[in-house]
Image (cartoon, rainbow, N blue to C red):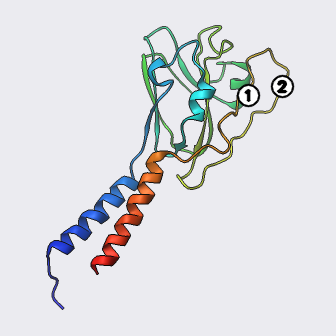
Amino acid sequence: MAFRFDHRTALIGAILFMCCAARGSATVHTVGDASGWGTGVDYSGWTAGNNFVIGDSLVFNYSPGTHTVNEVSADDYQSCSTSSYLTSDSSGSTTISLKSGGTHYFICGVPGHCVGGMKLAVTVASSPSSPTSPSTPSTTPSTANTTPSTTGYHNSPAPKTYANMAAAGSLGLLIVSLLL
């Protein structure tokens, strides 16, 4: 049987390519959206409107030298401590690639900023269809405003991009089956 290239073959190839390309795309999340990384931003509310998966990245935008982005442990997040940070940057544009599932914690190391709410806990799912549940740091006696919020971690709607990818994939399969 000889392979015949015609308009149906080209259409099937294009549909399959689009479905696969959409599935492998990662999302770049600008922390705080237009407000950026700074004081006075509700980062718990910001995370509630986003879903994070391995391969996505976080972009922290701020004026160089005015803030830091420190990735810290759950305990250091809770206590706003930067004594043993995992990573730190103060360049003004920090990009963090989310390479593993679970909860990742970020704080500003400038004195008073973290206690004032400049902290971010991001729960990363291993794939779009299997979100992980957040791990809440163990509670220890602390001052107000240091307990991480888990608002939005449960029952968050699937991001529109994944719903669109599923619809595109279903549509692509329907078209392919009709053409065959």
Q: Position of residue 33 (x, y in %)?
A: 47, 25
At horizontal 59% and vertical 54% (from top left) the residue drawn is 130
At horizontal 43% and vertical 11% (from top left) the residue drawn is 64
Q: Which residue is mark 1?
A: 75
Q: Which of 156 and 69 lies nearest the eye of the viewer? A: 156
- In the rendered structure, are the residues bearing label 2 and label 1 in contact, judged by CB atoms less than 8 Å apart? yes
Q: Is residue 106 visible?
A: no
Q: Quadrant of the N terminus?
A: bottom left
Residue 141 lies in quadrant: top right
Mark count? 2
SS category of the residue bearing label 1: helix
Left or right: 12 in relation to 124: left
At horizontal 59% and vertical 10% (from top left) the residue drawn is 110
Position above or below: 110 against 130: above
Q: Position of residue 34 (x, y in %)?
A: 44, 21
Separation of residues labelled 2 and 1 (CA atoms): 9 Å
At horizontal 67% and vertical 30% (from top left) the residue drawn is 73
Q: Which residue is mark 2?
A: 140
Q: Which of 105 and 153 lies nearest the eye of the viewer? A: 153
**Residue type indicated by callout 2:** Thr
Going from N to C along the chain, the mark reached first, 2 or 1, is: 1
**Residue type indicated by callout 1:** Asp
Q: Quadrant of the C terminus?
A: bottom left
SS category of the residue bearing label 2: loop
Q: Position of residue 147 (x, y in %)?
A: 75, 24
